[in-house]
Image (cartoon, coloured by chain):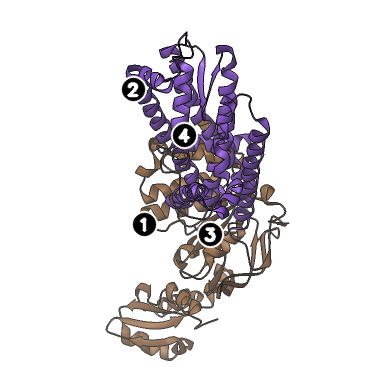
Chain colours: A purple, B brown
Amino acid sequence: MITLIWLELQKMFKKWRTYIGFIAIGFLAIVVQVALYFTGSKMIDFQMRGMEQSFVMVGNLFNGYFIARFILMALIIHIPFLIVIVGGDLLSGEATAGTYRMLLTRPVSRFQVVTAKFIAGWISVLLLLVWLLFLSLVVSLLLFGSGPLLSFQGMRLIIFAGNDILWRFACAYLFAFISMSTVISISIFFSSFVQNAIGPIAATMAVIIIFLILSAIPVDFFQTIKPYLFTNHMSQWDGFFNDPVDYKEIFQSLWYLLAHIVVIYGITIYIFIKKDILS
Amino acid sequence: MNSEQVIEVRGLTKKFGGLTAVNNLDLNVYRGDVFGFLGPNGAGKSTTIRMLLSLIKPTSGEMKIFGKSITKNRKEIFSKIGAIVEKPDFYLYLSAYKNLEILGKLSGADTSKKKIMDMLELVGLEKRYKSKVKTYSHGMKQRLGLAQALLHDPELIILDEPTTGLDPQGMKEIRDLIIYLSREKGKTIFLSSHILHEVELIATRMIIISKGTTQVEGTVEELLKSEKIIVTFEIDKVEDAMRIVNESKWKENFKSTSKSEINFELTKNEIALLNKFLIEKEILVSAVVPVRSLEDYFLRITEGGAK
């Protein structure tokens, strides 16, 4: 199984499309950092307006942690678009190339093939998020230095001390990994039906967009189903920047996303094992 | 013929909706066979091969390879099979070497550089081992297909139309390689083709299918020796020859004559006998040309005209 996963990763990272996400994140993170470097302090002033008269702010508030969270908030919404480029191609790419015939006539089961593809997909998500973490947190800390983290939660302003921040980022990224793994799992599921990557990419994005729109419509029916839509749980990573952290809500969302992954993976396995390979 | 059955198929049927692609097919392939699986395009050859390789599921029927059920012993069986199904497709963005390394590892083969390079040398691709497969011609991909099928030293090699799209030189090279694998390496080869001549050259046994059902099955010699073909004898003294023929048993085989030729309808074995007869009667035979090709036989079989 490890060999199979390793081979899948080799195939994946020999494809140009795999690097689109890394390049896009690299570009955006650097652009945001450069923009904030020159104009970011005004943003802090704007967000702190009205508070200067009541509080005396000391220390470096416009620091690497602030930038890292800002980048995470700005980019995490768009990462699904980059992830599905890889996920949508994982199974359909074999059909397009006709390589199913080579792959599935080896002494490996279809279960192993699909499982290896899912795991490779999740690893690609992990690597993409590690890349984002490196660019947003490590590089930002190097460029902007460290200090306390300002966190705006609705009308509340929370200030975390420097030694109370890193674990929050670690947990937020772990949660984001589960969120994004749900997205890539959906794209692999769609990928098992078709012979080109465009369909699964479009279908996954359509599902996410439709669910987000439904969640936003202020009609009782849609508000009733909102808690059952996985998109509603994807942004819970931000809960780690609240005080106190609402672990119950976070774990509820976590289990919900994990259940989605397991069910989608199971259905994909079932479909793929039953499928006639005609490509 | 070795009596150990390598492939045993009973009542194999595949239906796609209302279309029956393979209908109640029986197959027996024995160890050491070069088994020709013949049929016109659309006869159900590739569907049968896909079922043998578990790419598609049969509607009904039983398949055993190496005496074991494919569904229950898939991994064990597939570790001993090398196959090309239809045209060989590869990861085009990878080199030939990398493709073989990946596919070899999946088969549990020795994927050392030496082994892979030996295999590429066997199929004449060693100089292009670094090139991405997208730069390969169809013939090169076909040869790479053979390399991936042979890399793990399988006992059974299933080749689906391996010479399709090749030039005559390429076709001969593939045929020679199949003969080498069979005679020198003792491999069992299941060769699908729609070209009777190709199968006749290399197969020991064959089956002809049409519309998903078996038309004839047996050794190539058995199947072809009883089939009569039109043969033209080019001779020097046509009138003398005609007189001699009319006074002999060969009169029944006579079909027509022209200035320097006489046409007979003969079985393969009778050609040599008639030639010998004419020479003994001092008729100089300068050429013996089969006018009716084996392809006609094939066509008549697959069109249901003969059985």
Question: Picture coordinates of residue A30 (x, y %)?
Answer: 37, 23
Q: Are marks 2 and 1 in contact (CB under 8 Å)?
A: no
Chain assignment, label 1: B
- Marks 3 and 4: same chain? no
Between B252 and A206, the residue placed more toward the observer is A206
Whether callout 1 and callout 4 share a subunit is answered no
Under mark 4, the amino acid is Phe
Residue A51 % position (x, y): 46, 18
Displayed quadrant of residue A115: top right
What residue is pinned by disc 1? B168
Residue picked out by circle 3: B191
Q: Name the disc covering residue A35, or none.
A: 2
Say whether marks 3 and 4 touch (CB < 8 Å): no
Q: CA distance from mark 1 to mark 3?
A: 18 Å
Do the dots labelled 1 and 3 sit on one chain?
yes
Q: Nearer the viewer, mark 1 or mark 4?
A: 4
Q: Amino acid at mark 3?
A: Leu
Q: Please provide percent x and percent y for residue A245.
A: 63, 27
- Left of A34 or right of it: where is A138? right
The residue that disc 4 covers is A13
As measured in the structure, the alpha-carbon distance from the residue carrying label 3 to the one carrying label 2 is 66 Å
At which x and y percent is residue B208? 54, 71
